[in-house]
């Protein structure tokens, strides 16, 4: 109804290859959605597409609607021109990039790079107020305001990541997309950044799309999770439900491949095979070649449908209450429509 | 301009260079076809120019600075010689000096770069300093001073150009050898007791040769321009005709004021075409062996 | 701490200069002992030759002579021109401002125009504008600059006689004011400076284009787009300043080429600079002058490199805090 973000049938293509193949997403205000999947499954491309930041050569299609609080009309991102997007970007939706190594202009100090964003969207503010805001932002992310007068190369990796978060908050957006915010950091830094994101969510009522290949990170911070495979969403649902009771073979295998502290001893089971080549996608279900339960039915694309309350999966044989031996799919399931 | 080669090649207009074989590149792209075609033509003229030329290029006549006619396709010089014949014969000097000087430069540069990169230590420090010196010092004045000390001839030109152009190759080879030296297969070979000569011969050289080759082709372009400049300034071989000396004679005899465009334009055009051809071929080689350049599309 | 990097560059420059002096000195000795030429003077007794040798300091050891040579050079005593009998240094000093004027104008224009075109080509990579500019720059690289100069004379001084064909001032004219004379010089500067600019344009263009292409692939450019900056501002405020850094270092490699161009272009246009001086000295086999200009050219290039290093130091904060 009045979801903050609604994405319908998002597709991204390059040179005829489908990188994002029909993604639907919904995000409520203040909600944290995790986007999980292997490298190359299209997570980052989806994030960039939401802000229409794809490099030239990639085409996107699909409906993206943003309903930020206080906006009179919903923003139809899909139909906005580049000039129109410049008004939306950062003001309503911002992004924390993967790998903060090179995300800041190396020849400019930190403070002007944050105030630059503020100036863009709130031109009427006095310079003094802008400076104050930057100092506040830095404090919010746990940095001393003095760091604003340094150059990016004078900050550590963790500090740079926090600066990127401060930058993302500069214009008070209602949605922040964080793309692998902890990947380049050590475990201690990782925990700090995640705690920071959580606190910001609570204090500011931010909605968050957290992208990561690390399921543990998503489990801690998110309310709901969407699992992506080969450009498609294969499962969504509340984080606890998906983790405790996965409804797609891919999700199950992903979870199985995680070592559990205190759990049974054994070798973590990787998923055999590799993700499909976008230039030559398999017929029907894109997970079919690697799925232990693949059958004749799977040649016709399974749709994402609700299989448990609040949980949806794109598998013909969902809902799964138990996980049989590979290859042994109960006969009666064959007859399911 | 005669001093330095373009170290940044960005002429991959269609991005096709990387995956194709050398033969495909040379014959399949318009750059390759132009390069090979023009170079082939001038090499042919270098060998057979004097046979193909309609007149004796040195023969003077009373028909001085005459515009093109049926008898003289490109008119005559200030001595009444046939410009067209001079043009055809002039190819030899450019080709011979260009390739010979580049060869010397390549040998010298490779030897220095190899020794410097492989042996390290004081050898490296001294040779590297020498190399940097040659890179900083303006080449043309250096060539002028050296060439003027001796009586001008083709050999002098070849030696002088070769001795002053090697530093670019040296630096590239040194960098490559330094990378290779640290690689596992070299360490393994050494652990097995292989001698330096063996390692250089079987591991270092094969991995460096393509780089040297591509770079040398570009040095040929530089050498051709250097020869033309030296000849233009009066340091060319007086017994031979080259495009540079043609421009020198044209200029000194007032061809521009005499509106003798037939004398002034063709030699420079030939130099430009030949250098273009060689440079295009050189860039194609460079892109072929260097994957990174390929992605500059 | 940051000054150390710069001090290192200055030290390296001085060492290079020292080697230039060594090179020049040995070149002089290769010419042979000048007293052998003195010996050909009629009525010279062995005692007189010995005295002359002592006067010239030629009876000292090699090291001694080298010390003398360095001393002389530092006192700007570069010998006497064989042709004009003037002091080499005086001839160089008169010619230098003209060369600086020509080279300065050419380099400035080439850098400005070349960089501007490089940015255009990089932001339109693969399109027709880019291909056209690449082709043009390749042509200016391959074409000899003196040939371009001759064609310029042919077109603009002979066929359509709007500009002078050579020299720096109109001969035989009295000028009413300094300003009038400066204007006349400027008019004479147009063609040679055009030749010089065309020669250098291609290289600066290629360097800037390549540098921009690299910068545009960096993450922070996407971030600048993401915060809502219009593309032209992203390019102007963030891409170009970062692209200038490699431009400064890479163009330093071209300084030798600038010198070469100065020599040939001044020759074509009878521009009274160091290049023209060199050309005359070549024809006269005037070695003291040739060595003098070689020295000055080398010093010029070394100083230019040092200036480029200083410029880089001023522009790149990462180097400043090393």
Image: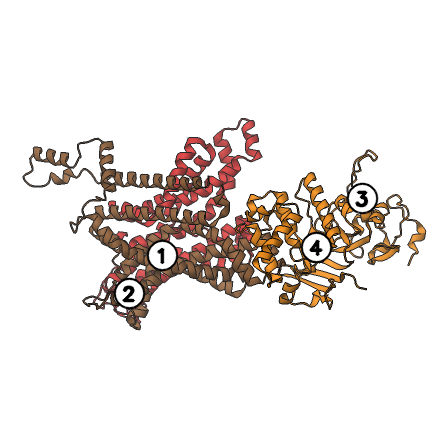
Chain colours: A orange, B red, C brown
For the residues tagged 1 and 4, is the chain the same? no
For the residues tagged 2 and 4, is the chain the same? no
Q: CA distance from mark 2 to mark 4?
A: 63 Å
Labels 2, 4: front one: 4
Q: CA distance from mark 1 to mark 4?
A: 74 Å
Residue B32 coordinates in the image, percent (x, y): 49, 57
* Pointers 3 and 4 in contact (C-beta within 8 Å): no
What mark, if any, has residue A176 been given in the picture?
4
Left or right, C169 with respect to C42, comes to right
Q: Which residue is mark 2?
A: C188
Q: Nearer the viewer, residue C177 or C170?
A: C177
Chain letter of disc 3 in the image: A
Give me the residue at 54% from left, 35% from top: B182
* Pointers 2 and 1 in contact (C-beta within 8 Å): no
Q: CA distance from mark 3 to mark 4?
A: 26 Å
What mark, if any, has residue B209 been given in the picture?
none
Q: Is residue A66 above or below residue A200?
A: below
Q: Which residue is mark 3?
A: A255
Residue B70 coordinates in the image, percent (x, y): 31, 71
For the residues tagged 3 and 4, is the chain the same? yes
Left or right, B40 with respect to A292, comes to left
Q: Is residue A184 above or below residue A42?
A: above
- How packed mark 1 is, by other alpha carbons closer than 10 Å (few <14, some 14-19, many 20 or more), is some
Give me the residue at 14% from left, 36% from top: C55
Give me the residue at 28% from left, 58% from top: C266
Give me the residue at 46% from left, 61% from top: C116
């Amino acid at each position: 109804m009045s979801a903050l973000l609604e994405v319908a049938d998002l597709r991204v293509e390059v040179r005829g290859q489908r990188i994002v193949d029909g993604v639907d997403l919904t995000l409520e205000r203040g909600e944290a959605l995790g986007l999980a999947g292997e490298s190359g499954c299209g997570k980052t491309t989806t994030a960039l597409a939401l802000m229409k930041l794809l490099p030239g050569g990639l085409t996107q299609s699909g409906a993206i609607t943003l309903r930020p609080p206080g906006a009179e009309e919903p923003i139809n991102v899909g139909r906005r021109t580049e000039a129109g997007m410049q008004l939306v970007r950062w003001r309503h939706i911002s992004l924390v990039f993967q790998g903060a190594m090179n995300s800041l202009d190396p020849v400019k100090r930190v403070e002007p790079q944050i105030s630059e964003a503020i100036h863009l969207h709130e031109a009427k503010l006095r310079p003094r107020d802008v400076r104050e805001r930057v100092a506040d932002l830095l404090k919010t992310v746990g940095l001393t305001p003095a760091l604003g007068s340094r150059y990016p190369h004078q900050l550590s990796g963790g500090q740079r990541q926090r600066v990127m978060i401060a930058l993302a908050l500069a214009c008070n957006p209602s949605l922040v997309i964080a793309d692998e915010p902890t990947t380049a950091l050590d475990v201690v830094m990782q925990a700090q950044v995640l705690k920071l994101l959580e606190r910001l969510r609570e204090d500011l009522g931010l909605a968050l799309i957290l992208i990561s290949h690390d399921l543990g990170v998503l489990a801690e911070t998110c309310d709901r999770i969407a699992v992506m495979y080969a450009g498609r969403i294969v499962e969504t649902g509340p984080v606890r439900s998906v983790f405790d009771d996965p409804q797609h073979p891919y999700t199950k295998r992903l979870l199985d491949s995680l070592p559990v502290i205190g759990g049974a001893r054994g070798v973590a089971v990787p998923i055999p095979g590799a993700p499909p080549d976008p230039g030559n996608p398999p017929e029907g279900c894109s997970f079919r070649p690697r799925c232990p339960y693949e059958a004749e039915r799977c040649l016709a694309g399974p749709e994402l449908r609700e299989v448990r309350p609040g949980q949806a999966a794109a598998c013909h044989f969902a809902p799964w209450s138990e996980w049989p031996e590979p290859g042994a799919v109960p006969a009666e399931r064959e007859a399911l429509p | 301009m005669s001093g330095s080669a373009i170290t940044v090649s960005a002429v991959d207009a269609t991005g096709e260079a990387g995956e194709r074989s050398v033969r495909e590149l040379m014959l399949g792209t318009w750059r390759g076809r132009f390069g090979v075609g023009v170079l082939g033509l001038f090499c042919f003229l270098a060998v057979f120019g004097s046979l193909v030329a309609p007149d004796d290029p040195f023969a003077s006549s009373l028909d001085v600075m005459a515009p093109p006619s049926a008898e003289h396709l490109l008119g005559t010089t200030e001595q009444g010689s046939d410009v067209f014949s001079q043009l055809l014969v002039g190819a030899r000097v450019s080709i011979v000096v260009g390739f010979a000087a580049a060869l010397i430069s390549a040998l010298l540069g490779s030897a220095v770069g190899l020794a410097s990169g492989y042996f390290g230590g004081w050898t490296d420090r001294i040779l590297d300093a020498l190399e940097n010196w040659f890179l900083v010092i303006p080449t043309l004045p250096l060539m002028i001073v050296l060439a003027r000390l001796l009586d001008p001839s083709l050999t002098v030109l070849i030696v002088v150009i070769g001795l002053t152009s090697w530093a670019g190759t040296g630096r590239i080879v040194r960098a490559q050898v330094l990378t290779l030296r640290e690689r596992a297969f070299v360490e393994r070979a050494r652990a097995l007791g292989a001698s330096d000569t063996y390692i250089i011969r079987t591991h270092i050289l094969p991995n460096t040769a393509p780089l040297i080759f591509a770079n040398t082709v570009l040095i040929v372009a530089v050498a051709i321009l250097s020869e033309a400049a030296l000849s233009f300034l009066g340091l060319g071989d007086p017994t031979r005709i080259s495009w540079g000396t043609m421009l020198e004679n044209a200029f000194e005899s007032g061809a521009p004021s005499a509106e003798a465009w037939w004398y002034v334009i063709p030699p420079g055009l030939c130099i430009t075409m030949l250098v273009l051809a060689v440079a295009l071929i050189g860039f194609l080689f460079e892109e072929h062996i260097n994957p990174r350049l390929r992605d500059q599309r | 701490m940051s000054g150390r990097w710069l001090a290192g560059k200055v030290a390296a420059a001085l060492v290079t200069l020292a080697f230039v002096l060594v090179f020049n000195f040995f070149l002089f000795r290769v010419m042979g002992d000048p007293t052998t030429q003195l010996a050909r003077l009629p009525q010279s007794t062995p005692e007189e030759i010995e005295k002359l040798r002592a006067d010239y300091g030629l009876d000292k050891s090699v090291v001694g002579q080298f010390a003398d040579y360095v001393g002389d050079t530092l006192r700007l005593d570069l010998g006497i021109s064989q042709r004009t009998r003037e002091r080499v240094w005086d001839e160089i000093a008169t010619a230098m401002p003209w060369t600086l004027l020509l080279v300065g104008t050419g380099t400035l224009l080439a850098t400005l125009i070349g960089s501007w075109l490089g940015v255009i080509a990089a932001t339109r990579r693969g399109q027709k504008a880019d291909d056209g500019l690449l082709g043009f720059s390749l042509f200016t690289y391959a074409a000899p600059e003196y040939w371009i100069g001759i064609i310029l004379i042919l077109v603009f001084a002979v066929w359509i006689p709007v500009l002078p064909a050579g020299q720096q001032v109109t001969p035989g004219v009295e000028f009413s004011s300094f300003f009038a004379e400066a204007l006349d010089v400027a008019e004479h500067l147009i063609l040679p400076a055009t030749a010089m600019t065309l020669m250098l344009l291609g290289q600066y263009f290629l360097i800037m284009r390549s540098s921009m292409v690299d910068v545009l692939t960096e993450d922070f450019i996407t971030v600048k787009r993401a915060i809502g900056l219009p593309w032209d501002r992203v390019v102007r405020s963030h891409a170009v300043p970062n692209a200038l850094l490699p431009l400064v270092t890479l163009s330093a490699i071209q300084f030798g080429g600038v010198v070469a161009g100065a020599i040939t272009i001044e020759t074509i246009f009878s521009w009274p600079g160091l290049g023209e001086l060199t050309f005359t000295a070549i024809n006269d086999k005037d070695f003291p002058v040739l060595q003098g200009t070689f020295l000055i050219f080398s010093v010029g290039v070394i100083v230019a490199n040092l200036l480029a290093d200083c410029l880089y130091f001023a522009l790149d904060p990462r180097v400043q805090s090393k």
